[in-house]
Amino acid sequence: MFVKFVLININLTNIGYHFRMKKLLLITFILLSSNLFADFSKRATSKIQLFQSGSEKQWCPITGLKIQDYYKTSYTAKLKSNGRYRQYSCLYALATDMQESGLDMNSVKVLAIDKNRYITVKDAYFLIKSAVNATFGKTSTLAFGDKNTALKYQNRYGGKIVDFKKALHVEQKNLKDALSYMVTIYKKKLYPMGKRVYKKRCKKIDTDDYIEINELKSDILLHKLCGKLDEKHLQALALYIWDVKRTGGIVNQIQKVKVNDDEKCPVCGMFVYKYPRWAAQIFYKHGNHEHHLSFDGVKDMMKFYFNNKKWGKYDFAKRKNISKILVTDYYTQKALDARGAYFVLGSNIYGPMGNELIPFASLKEAKNFKIDHKGEKILKFGEIKKDLPYKLDTK
């Protein structure tokens, strides 16, 4: 909203009075304009509703941000695999978890700012690309239960009012840019701050023990691994451990399994790019060319590996033509040579296609995961038998 202030020159005999009036009008303009364009607080103003379980429930599993501090941009949804609730600090986190873990889209709810409660996303009005600072990334998304209230915020902060489908599409298009933007910011201040805290105050922390950043934050506080920390220093520390120390570098520099947006799993037909946490690939050398096929999990990859003819006409996909097989390490998200990886099966962690063969770079990591998540076996690549992927489908 644009406001025009016009100073009217009045013919006053008292020049000092005239000057004071102009000064008063200027101060009024500054106060009004600063209030007009100030970013509103996303922090909860009353008791909040938490959907997750366990001591980590107060933090977002994707960004690590405290739900209470970003309550007004928060979402909740159930995992498709096991029906467990997740709670997110913003739409970026929800969209990321959709790709990595798979969500029951009928369960998605958003905090309506005007109602101060969660409503289904189909009943909400979303204000995107406004002047309000984003929770994560460059652009913000606010939700309302009443369209007139959404219009009032639009008049104040600008932006566009859309439905959830459009808001989600915009967020999904910008996931990589949002992460890159935030890492650039983190590198300047939060990573260095977290590193200082870690070196000065922390006991050794084994990152292999954690699947999500909120579990890490919970353990740091619960077991006093780094002494007493406020939320600012706790978040900086967790980001440093999760993004830098855990991966051996900055998060967006990890060598990952690279999947194009148009690649579908030849076994189930799903778009693989939607599930980067589970992505796997087989590369085939054929004459002077190299082809690759992408899969949304090791289980489907192994079905194809043992019997490619069952899934279509892939003349080049002969076992003797395989140049490499890549899988995604569950903890670090790094690309691994499948033939040197360890696979846990029968755990309580599910992939996009249900029960999975979950890859790890080391036997130690696989053993820790097996204990923590009630896995049944650990296998090397060469120990996986032809009928095993189908047995996993029946569990």
Image (cartoon, grey):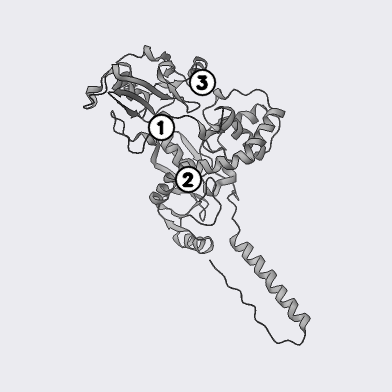
Q: Which residue is mark 3?
A: 372
- Label 3: few (<14), some (14–19) or many (≥20) C-alpha neighbours in 10 Å: few
Q: Regarding mark 1 in the picture, which secondary structure is present there? A: loop
CB contact under 8 Å: marks 2 and 1: no
Q: Which residue is mark 1?
A: 258
Query: Amino acid type of disc 2?
Result: Leu
CB contact under 8 Å: marks 3 and 1: no
The quarter of the picture where the C terminus appears is top left
Lower sequence index among marks 3 and 1: 1
**Quarter-of-image position of residue 312:** top left
Label 2 vs label 3, nearer the camera: 2
Residue toward you, 257 or 142: 257
Q: Mark 3 to mark 1: distance in Å? A: 29 Å
Q: Which residue is mark 2?
A: 91
Lower sequence index among marks 2 and 1: 2
x 74%, y 81%: residue: 18
- Label 1: few (<14), some (14–19) or many (≥20) C-alpha neighbours in 10 Å: some
Q: Mark 2 to mark 3: distance in Å? A: 29 Å
Badge number at residue 66:
none
Q: Looking at the picture, how far across and down is residue 292, in whole percent?
A: 33, 28
Lower sequence index among marks 2 and 3: 2
Query: Amino acid type of disc 1?
Result: Lys
Q: Looking at the picture, how far across and down is residue 205, in whole percent?
A: 62, 24
Query: Amino acid type of disc 3?
Result: Asp
**Quarter-of-image position of residue 187:** top right
- Seen in the picture, residue 171 relative to 324 is either above or below; the reply is below
Q: Looking at the picture, how far across and down is residue 183, in whole percent?
A: 56, 39
In the displayed structure image, the side of residue 8 where residue 111 appears, left or right: left
User: Of all residues shown, which one is farthest toward the front?
Assistant: 288
